[in-house]
Image: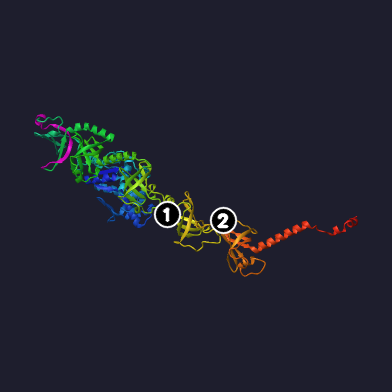
């Protein structure tokens, strides 16, 4: 039985390559990772503690088997179940358990004893199959493996940056190569294949070639490969071809147009004889039309073509995009011709062009842009990629477009995608992110409420960092505050609608976005006139804008400012004498006017001369009367006056004046004055 062991670090493509090689060789592919998943699945079903090695006794009663790409545990096909999220999250735990690894290694070795196998992992050549017939260590640069892993994740909808993926690869490499049990390392007798610049097909061909060289001729139908040098014995020469036998029974032919140095018209029999040795390069693997047996079509022109490959090496080194003509199309790709290099096979795998076989066929005889991805000197072939070329062209266009853009520019773009956090807007060759916070000045909860795919939007570039473009729509829209300031100004008076009643006063609606505050203190000039309970949401009230604060985006409103404050200039103190006019007569007294305000004179303060029932008994309405201020409170619009008090004050003033005058005119006589000189004697 032939044992093929393929080891290598994460992301090197081991599983993909192993499956294809196994299929082409008709070998059994052993997915060791699936086996660990199967053991994990059973452990989860049994409810064991996967961290405890002692709880893996169930391995004693476990039957594991594989059949091509299916895996069975205890007779049940668990190929789908082992890919569940639960298993994926927990599989790393059993992989660390020595008892599990020992059990599975024994199982894997037993399979390899009964079947031709391809087995991949990280310790197959060093631990599981140390005596493998062929050991391959499939490697690639960390950057290349990170790019592959990133592309795989993008296809699954996972957008993880290249830097994060590369760091993850490096950490995984370190763990795998330093773990205590079966660390990752290159087996002493392993052949290292660096796949960084190779296609999958090229790696597969290389491995199958190595399998053939190790004695697996009976197992493989691909004994020979294009570009391989073979030697044989000529057994027939015709007018246009030489026939020979290679490696015993294999037949080969070389046609005159594939002979280097052959001149049209020469007779091949004059140049080559039956029984002679012949060496050439395999140009094509074909089949004999009569027998169906393998037939090698050879060429000696390919030797010169190998020298011409230096041209393609230089082009690849420059990473230059070339134009090549499509000359043939098959289900696996297209054969191209670059300039006059007819003897060099330029192949475009179908995976390297974003078109179907039918679409590629329509390009026949047309030139397309390609990048050289691999130059194979052994096979005298060149692998190219249209996808890589288009990516580079698009990248160059993007770089050129980016060079023309600057922060502050205004452009029209088309919305190509709407996401939860914003919208992608295409600006010609590049796209930018219109974050939802930049859609509008107000809070945007649902981006789709503002833009839809296909919408043409005007945006402003607000940020450019590392090729990423930040866009803003709201930067081109007047801010609601600016619109408010265009509509409202300090000093404006209007009937406002109450948006909300709060403890501090009334919120008056100004626009859809803003309201102004009318504090309780701004309701009236009078402190005893309160707003309590007079207004509800939807009520209207006349207000005046007293202040607009740009920094706080706050508008101050006042209701009392819409009314004249007649008490503002009233400044009186108790006892002041003023003149008032009798305005009205009431039972309790009379309303009087002073300047532009109204006061009150109680009926008992009209006069002290007599008792009266009506003020007009003394002062007719309209009479100007001099009175004395008894009380004045402008904040409460209160002024109380008294004519009687002023009358009494006048009488007192007259009496004081008279008394003072009398005192000055008539001297005051005392007892001492009467005694005269006698008083003096008495005192002596």
Report the residue marked by disc 1: 513
Residue 177 magenta: no
Mark sitting earlier along the chain (2/1): 1
Residue 280 magenta: yes
Residue 61, compared with residue 236, is above or below; it is below
Report the residue marked by disc 2: 568
> Gap in Å between the C-alphas at discs 2 and 1?
36 Å
Q: Position of residue 223 (x, y in %)?
A: 19, 40
Q: Observer-nearest residue: 46 or 576? A: 576
Q: Observer-nearest residue: 376 or 278? A: 376
Camera-nearest label, 2 or 1 = 2
Tell me the quarter of the picture where residue 589 sits: bottom right
Q: Which mark is residue 556?
A: none
Do the CB atoms of the residues marked 2 and 1 lie less than 8 Å apart? Answer: no
The quarter in which the N terminus is drawn is top left
Image: magenta residue range: 267-290
The answer to whether residue 124 is left or right of residue 607 is left
The answer to whether residue 74 is left or right of residue 575 is left
Secondary structure at badge 2 equals loop
Dot 2, crowdedness within 10 Å: few (<14), some or many (≥20)? few
Q: Is residue 90 visible?
A: no
The answer to whether residue 66 is left or right of residue 521 is left
The quarter in which the C terminus is drawn is bottom right
Q: Observer-nearest residue: 296 or 521? A: 521
Question: Which residue is rendered at x = 11% and y = 43% of the image?
Answer: 291
Secondary structure at badge 1 equals loop
């Amino acid at each position: 039985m032939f044992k093929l062991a393929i080891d290598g670090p994460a992301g090197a493509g081991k599983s993909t390559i192993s499956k294809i090689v196994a299929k082409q060789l008709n070998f059994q592919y052993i997915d060791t990772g699936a086996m660990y998943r199967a053991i994990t699945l059973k452990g989860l079903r049994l409810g064991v503690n996967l961290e405890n090695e002692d709880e893996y006794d169930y391995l004693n009663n476990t039957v594991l088997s594989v059949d091509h790409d299916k895996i069975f545990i205890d007779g049940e096909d668990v190929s789908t179940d082992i890919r569940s999220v639960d298993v994926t999250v927990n599989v790393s735990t059993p992989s660390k358990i020595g008892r599990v690894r020992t059990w599975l290694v024994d199982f894997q070795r037993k399979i390899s004893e009964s079947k031709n196998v391809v087995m991949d992992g990280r310790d197959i050549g060093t631990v599981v199959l140390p005596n493998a017939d062929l050991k391959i260590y499939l490697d690639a640069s960390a950057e290349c493996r990170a790019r592959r892993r990133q592309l795989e994740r993008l296809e699954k909808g996972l957008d993880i940056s290249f830097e994060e993926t590369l760091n993850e690869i490096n950490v995984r490499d370190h763990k795998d190569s330093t773990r205590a049990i079966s660390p990752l390392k290159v087996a002493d007798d392993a052949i290292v294949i660096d796949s960084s610049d190779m296609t999958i097909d090229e790696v597969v061909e290389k491995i199958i070639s190595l399998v053939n060289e190790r004695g697996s001729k009976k197992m493989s139908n691909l004994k020979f490969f294009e570009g391989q040098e073979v030697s044989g014995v000529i057994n027939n020469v015709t007018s246009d071809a030489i026939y020979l036998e290679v490696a015993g029974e294999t037949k080969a032919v070389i046609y005159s147009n594939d002979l280097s140095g052959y001149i049209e018209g020469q007779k091949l029999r004059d140049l080559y004889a039956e029984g002679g040795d012949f060496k050439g390069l395999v140009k094509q693997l074909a089949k004999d039309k009569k027998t169906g047996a393998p037939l090698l079509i050879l060429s000696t022109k390919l030797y010169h073509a190998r020298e011409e490959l230096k041209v393609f090496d230089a082009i690849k080194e420059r990473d230059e995009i070339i134009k090549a003509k499509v000359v043939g199309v098959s289900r696996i790709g297209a054969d191209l011709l670059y300039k006059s290099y007819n003897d060099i096979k330029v192949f475009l795998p179908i995976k390297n062009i974003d078109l179907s076989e039918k679409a590629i066929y329509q390009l026949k005889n047309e030139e397309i842009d390609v990048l050289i991805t691999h130059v194979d000197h052994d096979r005298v072939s060149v692998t190219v990629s249209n996808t890589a070329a288009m990516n580079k062209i698009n990248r160059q266009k993007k770089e050129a477009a980016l060079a023309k853009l600057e922060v502050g520019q205004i452009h029209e773009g088309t919305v190509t995608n709407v996401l939860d956090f914003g919208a992608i807007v295409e600006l010609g060759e590049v796209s930018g992110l219109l974050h939802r916070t930049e859609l509008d000045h107000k809070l945007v909860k649902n981006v789709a409420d503002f833009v839809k795919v296909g919408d043409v939007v005007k945006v402003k570039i607000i940020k450019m960092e590392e090729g990423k473009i930040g866009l803003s729509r709201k930067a081109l829209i007047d801010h609601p505050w600016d619109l408010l300031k265009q509509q409202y100004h300090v000093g404006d008076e209007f009937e406002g609608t109450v948006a909300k009643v709060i403890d501090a006063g009334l919120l008056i609606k100004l626009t859809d976005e803003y309201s102004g505050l009318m504090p309780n203190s701004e309701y009236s000039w009078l402190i005893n006139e309160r707003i309590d309970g007079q207004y509800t949401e939807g009520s209207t009230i006349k207000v005046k804008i007293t202040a607009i604060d740009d920094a706080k985006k706050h508008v101050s409103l006042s209701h009392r400012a819409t009314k004249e404050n007649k008490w503002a200039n009233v400044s009186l103190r108790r006892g002041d004498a003023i003149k008032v006019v009798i305005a009205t007569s009431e039972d309790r007294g009379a309303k009087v006017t002073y300047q532009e305000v109204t006061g009150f004179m109680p009926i008992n303060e009209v006069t002290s001369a007599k008792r009266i029932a009506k003020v007009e008994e003394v002062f007719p309405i309209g009479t100007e009367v001099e009175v004395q201020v008894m009380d004045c409170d402008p904040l409460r619009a209160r002024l109380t006056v008294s004519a009687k008090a002023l009358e009494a004050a006048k009488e007192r003033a007259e009496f004081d004046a008279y008394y003072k005058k009398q005192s000055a005119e008539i001297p005051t006589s005392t007892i001492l004055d009467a005694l005269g000189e006698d008083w003096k004697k008495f005192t002596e």
